[in-house]
C-alpha cells in the first residue's frame, strides 16, 4: 500500500501512515494537489471540518498550508489511532481536534463556530455523501456564507442532490475520483440569488 504524503507547506514531504482495509477512502496525491490548487490561498486561516477523517491526509495538508484549525470526525477507533499518530508526526496537532464518533450524529449535534470548508469523503458506494449533504443543508449555519462543501466520490456514485440552501457550482474528475463543489445560496435584500465566483 502506497503512503500518502503532505505535498506543500510546513509538513511538506511527510509520509503518512496509511489505514489498511476499506474503512477509508484514500485520496491520491494527484487529486489532493488539484484540490488545493483550486482552494489556493483561501485555505490560509480557514477552519476546515474533515468528515470521515481517515488518515487525515486532507486535513493535515490544509494545516500544513496554513489553515487555522481542522476538526476531524472519524468513527473507527483503529483509524482514529492512525489519524492521531499522523497529526503528531506532522507537528500540527495543536491546531487540530479529533472527534471519535459517527459523522452524521456529529453534524446533527454541532452548534459552535462555523467552518469555511467541509470535506466529505465517506466509504464508497454507500450513498453516505448524499446523507451528509442533506444534514448540512438542514443546518446551513454550519458553514460561513462564502464557504464550500467539497465531496470526494467515485464518478459512478454521482447523482444530483436536491438542496435548499446549497448549490453545486463545479465538478472536477481525475480518473476514478470526482470532486464536487457546493456553495451557499445567498439572498440579497431583494431576494435575488447572489452568484458567487467559481473556482476558476
Image: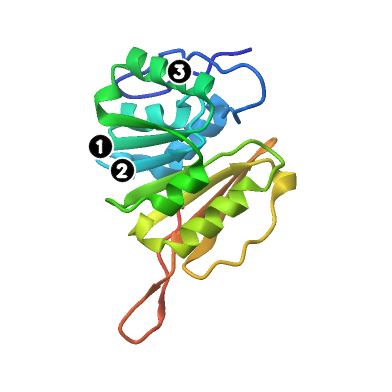
Spot occupied by residue 16 in the image (x, y as percentages of width and height): 47, 15
- Whichever of labels 1 and 3 marks the residue nearer the N terminus, that label is 1
Please state which of the two labelled residues, at mark 2 or mark 3, is closer to the viewer. Answer: 3
Image position of 152 with respect to 192: above or below: above
Q: In which quarter of the image is residue 65?
A: top left
Classify residue 57 as left or right of residue 114: right
Image position of 90 with respect to 177: above or below: above
Spot occupied by residue 3 in the image (x, y as percentages of width and height): 54, 14
Give the residue pinned by disc 3: 81
Outermost residue, bottom side: 190
Q: How far apart are marks 2 and 3 (CA)?
A: 22 Å
Give the residue pinned by disc 2: 47
Q: Are marks 1 and 2 in contact (CB under 8 Å)?
A: yes
Image position of 55 with respect to 15: above or below: below
Q: In which quarter of the image is residue 179?
A: top right
Give the residue pinned by disc 1: 68
Q: Residues within 10 Å of mark 1 (few under 14, many from 20)?
A: some
Q: How far apart are marks 1 and 3 (CA)?
A: 23 Å
Spot occupied by residue 18 in the image (x, y as percentages of width and height): 54, 16
> Which residue is depicted at the point 44% across and 45% down?
106
Classify residue 32 as left or right of residue 188: right
Amino acid at each position: 500500500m502506497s503512503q500518502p504524503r503532505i505535498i506543500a507547506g510546513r509538513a511538506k514531504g511527510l509520509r503518512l501512515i496509511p489505514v489498511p482495509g476499506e474503512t477509508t477512502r484514500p485520496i491520491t496525491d494527484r487529486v489532493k494537489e488539484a484540490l488545493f490548487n483550486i482552494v489556493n490561498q483561501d485555505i490560509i486561516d480557514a477552519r476546515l471540518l474533515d468528515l470521515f477523517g481517515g488518515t487525515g491526509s486532507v486535513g493535515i495538508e490544509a494545516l500544513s498550508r496554513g489553515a487555522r484549525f481542522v476538526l476531524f470526525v472519524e468513527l473507527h477507533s483503529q483509524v482514529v489511532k492512525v489519524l492521531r499518530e499522523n497529526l503528531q508526526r506532522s507537528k500540527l496537532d495543536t491546531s487540530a481536534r479529533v472527534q471519535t464518533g459517527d459523522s452524521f450524529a456529529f453534524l446533527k449535534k454541532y452548534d459552535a463556530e462555523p467552518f469555511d470548508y467541509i470535506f466529505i469523503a465517506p466509504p464508497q458506494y454507500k450513498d453516505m455523501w448524499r446523507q451528509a449533504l442533506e444534514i448540512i443543508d438542514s443546518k446551513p449555519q454550519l458553514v460561513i456564507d462564502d464557504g464550500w462543501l467539497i465531496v470526494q466520490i467515485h464518478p459512478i456514485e454521482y447523482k444530483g442532490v436536491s438542496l435548499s440552501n446549497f448549490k453545486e457550482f463545479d465538478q472536477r474528475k481525475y480518473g476514478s475520483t470526482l470532486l464536487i463543489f457546493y456553495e451557499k445560496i445567498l439572498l440579497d435584500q431583494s431576494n435575488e440569488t447572489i452568484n458567487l465566483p467559481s473556482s476558476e
